[in-house]
């Protein structure tokens, strides 16, 4: 399993509807950092203006894996999109209200 960073967005498992606390990513510094939608996105002490990275989660109850992407814009974490592996389309998005 190893180290990872977290994106703190509550969501529900698409298979069993169990509430999940966050997503994980190994695409960043693997420094056990926690990122939140709407907050400044700081990576290695520097503010990131734009970008995207992969996220995933595995349900603790039924072990269903979900994948998606997180999007950074204007120096903040702006949006998290969860994808369906079967349909290959966005099934749920969490973003900052503007």
Image: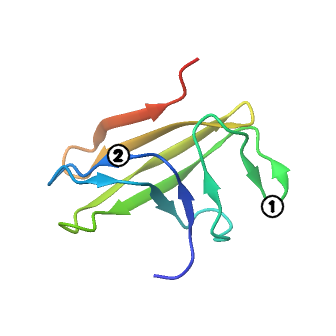
Label 2: how many residues lie within 10 Å, few (<14), some (14-19) or many (20+)?
A: some
Q: Nearer the viewer, mark 2 or mark 1?
A: 2
Instruction: Residue at 29% x, 51% y: name it.
Output: 19
Residue indicated by mark 1:
44
- Marks 2,1: beta carbons within 8 A: no
Which label is found at residue 25?
none
Quadrant in the picture for the N terminus: bottom left
* 21 shown above or below 92: below
The quarter of the picture where residue 83 lies is top left
Q: How is the image coloured?
A: rainbow
Instruction: Residue at 71% x, 45% y: name it.
Output: 41
Nearest the eye: 91 or 89:
91
Q: Position of residue 65 (x, y in %)?
A: 28, 62
Horizontal side, residue 93 vs residue 53: left or right:
left
Q: Position of residue 39 (x, y in %)?
A: 67, 38
Instruction: Residue at 63% x, 71% y: name it.
Output: 30
The quarter of the picture where residue 32 lies is bottom right
Point out the residue furthest to the left here: 16
Label 1: how many residues lie within 10 Å, few (<14), some (14-19) or many (20+)?
A: few
Residue indicated by mark 2:
11
Q: Secondary structure at mark 1?
A: loop
Q: Secondary structure at mark 2?
A: strand
């Amino acid at each position: 399993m190893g180290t990872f960073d977290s994106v703190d967005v509550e969501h529900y498992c698409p298979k069993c509807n169990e509430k999940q606390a966050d997503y994980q990513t190994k695409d960043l510094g693997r420094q056990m950092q926690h990122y939140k939608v709407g907050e400044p996105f700081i990576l290695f002490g520097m503010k990131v203006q734009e970008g995207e990275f992969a996220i995933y989660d595995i349900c603790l109850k039924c072990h269903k894996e979900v994948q998606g992407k997180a999007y950074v814009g204007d120096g903040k974490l702006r949006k998290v999109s969860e994808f369906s592996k079967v349909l290959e389309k966005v099934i749920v998005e969490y973003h900052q209200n503007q």
